[in-house]
Image: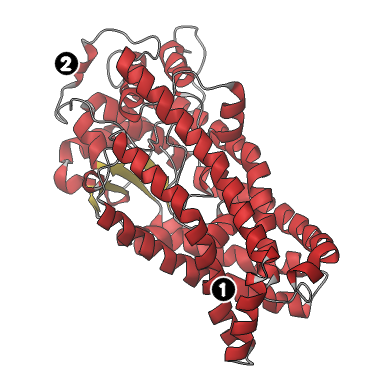
Amino acid sequence: MGRCVLAHRFLLLLSFALWAGAGANAGGRLIAPVAAISAGQTGTTEQNSPQASTSESNQADKTEQYTLPHDKYEKAIAYSRAGYALYFVSYVLTIAAILLLLRLGIAAKFRDFAEGVSERRWLQGLVFVPLLIFAMDVCDLPVRTYWHALSLRYEQSIQSWGSWIWDWGKEELLHCVFAIILVLILYSVMRRSPRRWWLYFWFAALPIILGIIISTPWIIDPLFSHFELLDLKHPELTAGIERLTHHAGLQIPRDRVFLMDASRKTNSINAYVTGLSASKRIVVYDTTIQKMSSSETLFILGHELGHYVLGHVWKGFLFFSIALLAALYLIFRGLHWALHRWSGDWKIYGPEDWASLAVILLLLQVVSFFSAPIANGFSRLEEHAADVYGLELIHGVMPNSEDVAARAFQRLGELDLADPNPSDFITFWLYSHPPLAERLVFAHNYDPWAKGEPPKYVK
């Protein structure tokens, strides 16, 4: 139950980093240990039949707390701590790499090369931006490579290195295309309004980012995974979703629920809401259906329906828009301060110099890092609301609904090697979802009906 974020570096930092800061440095989510129904990468365990009956599932023992056997507990701790460490190391290395590009004058040399190619600004941008973006991504590549190796070691990923490199290449191409568009607009606005470019660029960037979000399910996501209507392979599950939506008084068309062929690359269990307007959809990994009972899968989908119904994608975009405006103003102020102090050392002539993009990216990294707790705190609120919605939605539809939800969280924790007890600091800074142990206890104990209280969302 997460958000798939593809864009990396400049595009990511402009369009999503303030919203999903925990994954900003890895072109995806480095923090697999973030305990959530959106799995990062998962471990292999015995599979439940996707056709397991609800009645059979309800005969299982009640799950009141998140527990793991000793061997899996040790793996979860090690895997989680590695993820936390890589997150912070990634930021440190990226900032160090940018500073090195500036201190050694490499960014300035890229600028000189681009200006030597053509006198036309837009052609210079076509040369300079890919050079800088690729240089930064190559510096980040060791961290990403190590994370994939770690995921393979802990049986969280099954993607071959050839496939992984191919995906990385496609990401690089997309990063460059989007970065070129945004950078050309940015520097055009800078030249026209040196004092208000941060505001005018914000106005210009929002429609582009909105278009990217809308088009991602149609254009970008299919470049990396195969999608088909859930109804084609799992009509019974689709019928169960329809019963849930009918129970809530909603109309979610069957053509808005998709199945993703994730099992070719990962053992991860996941479901998420993506897109906006006509592209808005619910996506379910095939591994989720393979490894969980029907009732547990329906709870997960109930959670996703919560995101859908509660308008979390739109709310997230609005939240990001405000955060982006604040970030751009901080970058505007920081850029002038940094160039006043070090422009001579870095051989940068002013804010409109192409080489100043490296300084902007450096400031974006800093803003992204320190804004992560705010963005993740907002995300945790939405994820908790979706949990509440999912619990209310399945209440009365399936017996012992609270136990079903609790078992779903337990199963997810076992498969994802979720950290059993993350520290308050790690939760505050990194977790886009409440810790899984807390979600499990909440699911097991949530029962407003027994107290004579009205449910919050599903009346």
Please state the horizontal and vertical placement of residue 106, each as a whole percent of the image: 63, 71
Q: Residue 369 sits in which quadrant?
A: top right
At x 68%, y 65%, the residue is 102
Q: Residue 361 sits in which quadrant?
A: bottom right
Residue 221 falls left or right of residue 239: right
Any part of residue 404 in sight: no
Please state the horizontal and vertical placement of residue 299, each as a whole percent of the image: 33, 27
Q: Is residue 252 above or below residue 9?
A: above
Please state the horizontal and vertical placement of residue 60, each as a whole percent of the image: 23, 10
At x 64%, y 60%, the residue is 100
Q: Is residue 69 above or below residue 105?
A: above
Residue on which disc 1 sits = 129
**Gap in angstroms between the C-alphas marked 2 and 1:** 57 Å
Residue contact at pointers 2 and 1, CB within 8 angstroms: no
Residue on which disc 2 sits = 56
**Dot 1 alpha-carbon crowd within 10 angstroms: few under 14, some 14 to 19, many 20 or more:** many
Amino acid at dot 2 = Glu
At x 59%, y 92%, the residue is 118
- Mark closest to the chain's N terminus, 2 or 1: 2
- Between residues 136 and 318, which one lies in front from this camera angle? 136
Residue 245 falls left or right of residue 14: left
- Between residues 108 and 67, which one lies in front from this camera angle? 108
